[in-house]
Image (cartoon, rainbow, N blue to C red):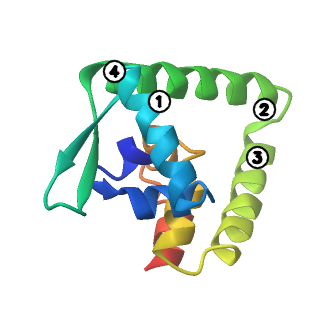
């Protein structure tokens, strides 16, 4: 999800977003690459950008669909007014926890841009990150 939201991310930024050590991030990327989900774009001997493969992009779409369905089921007992109230409260909470781009990458890996920025809404995390 992190790579889908931030194509071309470095392994260092990827690791920080997942709160992993550099070596932990490299091991995770190794596994994702071995599974055919991620590819490395080598820029220099020490610089690599991360991108999803077509298989990785399909996996992201599957994950996002499952998340949206689970959230819809969880929120189904709420009225539309209650949903708007909850959305406003969550937006304030998320914005308060966001202090920059590292927070944006950390928080947004758990989200779906299609859900977050649809219907004229803007992402509160993105706004707070500046």
Mark 3 residue element = helix
Front residue of 52 and 42: 42
Q: Is residue 15 above or below residue 74?
A: below
Q: Could you tell me if residue 1 is visible in this image? A: no
Q: Residues within 10 Å of mark 4 (few under 14, many from 20)?
A: some
User: Which numbered mark, 4 or 1, is in the foreground of this view?
Assistant: 1
Q: Spatial distance from mark 4 to mark 2, Cα to Cα?
A: 34 Å
Residue 50: image x %, image y %?
A: 29, 47
User: Which numbered mark, 2 or 1, is in the foreground of this view?
Assistant: 1
> Which residue corresponds to mark 2?
75
Please tell me the numbered disc located at residue 36: 4
Q: Residues within 10 Å of mark 1 (few under 14, many from 20)?
A: few
User: Which numbered mark, 3 or 1, is in the foreground of this view?
Assistant: 1
Q: Spatial distance from mark 3 to mark 1, Cα to Cα?
A: 44 Å
Ranked by sequence position, the earlier of labels 3 and 4 is 4
Q: Which residue is situated farthest in the right direction here? A: 77
Mark 1 residue element = helix
Front residue of 54 and 68: 54
| 63 on left or right of 42 | right
Ranked by sequence position, the earlier of labels 3 and 1 is 1
Q: Quadrant of residue 19?
A: bottom right
> Which residue corresponds to mark 1?
31
Q: Residues within 10 Å of mark 3 (few under 14, many from 20)?
A: few
Residue 103: image x %, image y %?
A: 57, 69
Residue 115: image x %, image y %?
A: 50, 39
Ranked by sequence position, the earlier of labels 2 and 1 is 1
Say if mark 3 contacts mark 2, CB within 8 Å: no
Say if mark 4 contacts mark 1, CB within 8 Å: no
Q: Spatial distance from mark 3 to mark 4, Cα to Cα?
A: 43 Å
> Which residue corresponds to mark 3?
81
């Amino acid at each position: 999800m992190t790579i889908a939201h931030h194509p071309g991310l470095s392994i260092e930024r990827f690791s920080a977003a997942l709160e992993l050590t550099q070596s932990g991030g490299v091991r995770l990327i190794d596994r994702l690459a071995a599974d055919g989900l991620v590819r490395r774009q080598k820029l220099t001997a020490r610089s690599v950008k991360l991108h999803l493969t077509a298989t990785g992009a399909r996996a992201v779409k599957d994950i996002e669909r499952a998340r949206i369905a689970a959230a819809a089921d969880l929120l189904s007992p709420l009225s539309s007014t209650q949903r708007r109230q909850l959305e406003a409260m969550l937006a304030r909470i998320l914005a308060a926890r966001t202090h920059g781009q590292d927070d944006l990458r950390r928080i947004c890996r758990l989200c779906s841009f299609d859900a977050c920025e649809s219907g004229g809404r803007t992402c509160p995390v993105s706004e707070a990150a500046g």
